[in-house]
Image (cartoon, grey):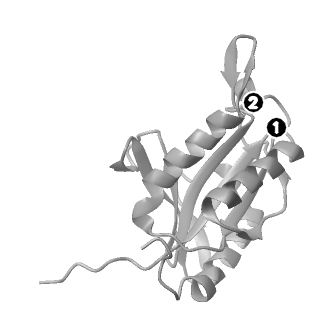
């Protein structure tokens, strides 16, 4: 019989979608206060993959991926998602009688074989991880590269994203050798 083993620490990442560069910069500062210094950042790019956020956040959104220096435990993903949801709410504004987010933060983690994202939305390929949060494997690493899956969002399929998460995977050997500081 196999014995249960605790997983190794992983690299915390986030996809940040924002109205403008100032909002994006402020969100990164807040995230750094919550999760520690940012180790890697992707270039900022226009978020033109869907109009899903436009009604709430406005047009001409921008996005950036970030990775944090401090390793985390995979089992902390649900609480991390709840924390980023609270951050989004704290940055929201009242416009026309409605609360509108100015920033959207999608946390996840990179492990050697996968990129996992957290979400509040249930679907057939997502696993419930507690506190109203689900997790999905968004990319898998095989044959030396990241491979999208049928449900992988278009912005995570881009060369920019695949290159960024390849660099993040390299952080595992540098930053995850030590034990997770929160243990």
Label 2, secondary structure: give it. Answer: helix
Label 1, secondary structure: give it. Answer: loop
Q: Residue at x 57, y 41 (%)?
A: 85
Q: Residue at x 22, y 78 (%)?
A: 4
x, y percentage for residue 72?
Answer: 51, 70
Callouts 1 and 2 close, C-beta under 8 Å: yes
x, y percentage for residue 45?
Answer: 84, 53
Q: Which mark is residue 57?
A: 2
| Image quarter in which the N terminus is found | bottom left
Q: Residue at x 86, y 41 (%)?
A: 20
Taking 13 as reference, is 30 left or right? right
Q: Which residue is mark 1?
A: 19
x, y percentage for residue 75?
Answer: 39, 63
Q: Which mark is residue 44?
A: none
Residue 96, image quadrant: top right
* Vertical order, 141 against 115 (above or below): below
Residue found at the far left of this picture: 1
Q: Earlier in the sequence, mark 1 or mark 2?
A: 1
* Vertical order, 51 against 139 (above or below): above
* Vertical order, 36 against 56 (above or below): below
Closest to the observer, 159 or 14: 14
Q: Is residue 46 visible?
A: no
Measure the alpha-carbon separation of dots 1 and 2: 6 Å
Q: Is residue 164 visible?
A: yes
Would you call the spot at circle 2 few (<14 residues within 10 Å), some (14-19), or many (20 or more)? many
x, y percentage for residue 56?
Answer: 71, 26
Number of numbered labels in the structure image: 2
Residue 176, image quadrant: bottom right
């Amino acid at each position: 019989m196999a014995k249960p083993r605790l997983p190794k620490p992983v690299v915390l990442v986030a996809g940040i979608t924002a109205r403008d560069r100032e909002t994006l910069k402020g969100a990164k500062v807040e995230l750094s206060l919550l999760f520690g210094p940012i180790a890697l950042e992707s270039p900022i790019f226009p978020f033109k993959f869907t109009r899903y956020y436009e009604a709430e956040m406005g047009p001409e959104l921008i996005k950036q991926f970030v990775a944090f220096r401090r390793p985390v435990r995979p089992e902390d993903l649900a609480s991390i998602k709840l924390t980023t949801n609270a951050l989004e709410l704290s940055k929201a504004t009242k416009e026309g009688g409605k609360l509108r987010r100015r920033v959207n933060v999608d946390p996840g983690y990179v492990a050697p074989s996968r990129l996992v994202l957290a979400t509040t939305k249930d679907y057939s390929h997502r696993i419930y991880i507690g506190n109203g949060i689900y997790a999905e494997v968004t990319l898998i690493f095989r044959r030396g590269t990241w491979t999208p899956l049928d449900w992988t969002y278009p912005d995570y399929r881009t060369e920019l994203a695949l290159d960024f998460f390849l660099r993040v995977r390299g952080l595992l050997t540098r930053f995850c050798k030590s034990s997770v500081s929160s243990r």
